[in-house]
Image (cartoon, helix red, strand yellow):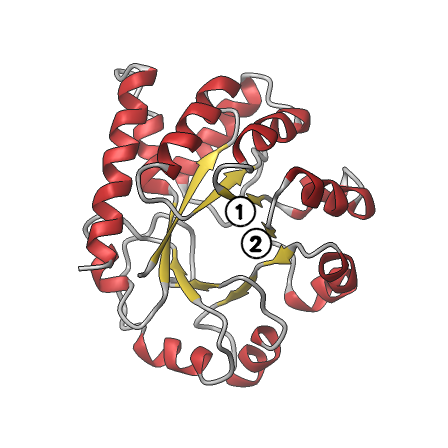
Amino acid sequence: MKKLVAYITTGYPEKSFSIDLALALGESGVDTLELGVPFSDPVADGPLIEKANHKALELGFKFKHLLEISKAVAPKVDTLWMGYFNSFYQQNMEKLVPLAKEIGINGLIIPDLPHEEALAYRELFNSNNVSNISFVAPTDSEKRIQEIVKDSKKFIYMVAYTGITGSGSAEDLQPFLSSIKKYTATPVYVGFGVNKKTAKDKVKGADGVIVGSAFIDILLKESLSYENKIKECSELAKILKSEINS
């Protein structure tokens, strides 16, 4: 069965809501949850996620809230932290990665930490059995793809579009997928621009999809109650899971 990864902006609109949403998604077909760490300049994210990041920060998000939410969610749903390197670096990586393991976090996704720089932390991640998720983009050469994926853990984040998340660009991904799978048995998940309209097409040849902006779009609807936001996100998760496995 193909896997569904869902991204939510941690602490938006508030802590207890994030916990309730995360657990509801886990019961609605989401295999892995990305708890996004709000950041002031999320360069790889589209306008929806950027807006949610800014709103979370305005509402007083602190890193300790990520830890508190993670402790409630990680025992019940496979959970990753997704954030920009500075957010983690400020917490001291040597202390943070073991803490992540202790809480039950299974990996980190750091879009602005290039593979070459991530090598400095490889032993830290490996010794704590926490994955540092590898990114592969269509702009990478075959040689670089081979280098990146040889140490990949858990899954490979395949950037389906060389831009920002939420883009609907639908170029043919098959040659790119083939060039990745040639060098690794690690599952490949497609991210960027995945929604209920594109999921079935984008997952072809891949092992799963990563969906962020489609969930955040619901969370940003101020006309919806917290209860209805959770309901709509849960329904979206069920549709996506069905689409990628139909």
Does any portion of residue 86 appear in the rendered image? Answer: no
Q: Nearer the viewer, residue 233 or 176?
A: 233
Q: Is residue 140 left or right of residue 46?
A: right
Q: Residue at x 57, y 85 (%)?
A: 143
Q: Residue furthest front?
A: 75
Look at the image and tell me in which quarter the N terminus lies. Answer: bottom left
Q: Crowding at label 1, few (<14), some or many (≥20) Cα neighbours within 10 Å?
A: some
Circles 2, 1 touching at the beta carbon (< 8 Å):
yes
Circle 1 SS class: loop
Q: Give the mark nearer the N terminus: 2 vs 1.
A: 1
Q: Give the quarter of the image for residue 38.
A: top right
Quadrant where the C terminus sits is: bottom left
Q: Which mark is residue 184?
A: none
Give the amino acid type for the residue marked by disc 1 in the picture.
Answer: Val
Q: Would residue 162 be found to the left or right of residue 54 on screen? A: left
Q: Position of residue 105 (x, y in %)?
A: 61, 44
Q: Amino acid at mark 2?
A: Pro
Front residue (pair 16, 218): 16
Badge 1 is on which residue?
A: 43
Secondary structure state at the residue bearing disc 2: loop
| Position in image of residue 141 (x %, y %) | 52, 81
> Separation of disc 2 and disc 1 at Cα?
9 Å
Q: Disc number at residue 111?
A: 2
Q: Is residue 194 above or below residue 144?
A: above
Q: Quadrant of residue 51?
A: top left
Query: On the rendered structure, is 232 left or right of 58?
Result: left
Vertical placement of residue 13 versus 121, above or below: above
Q: Quadrant of residue 103?
A: top right
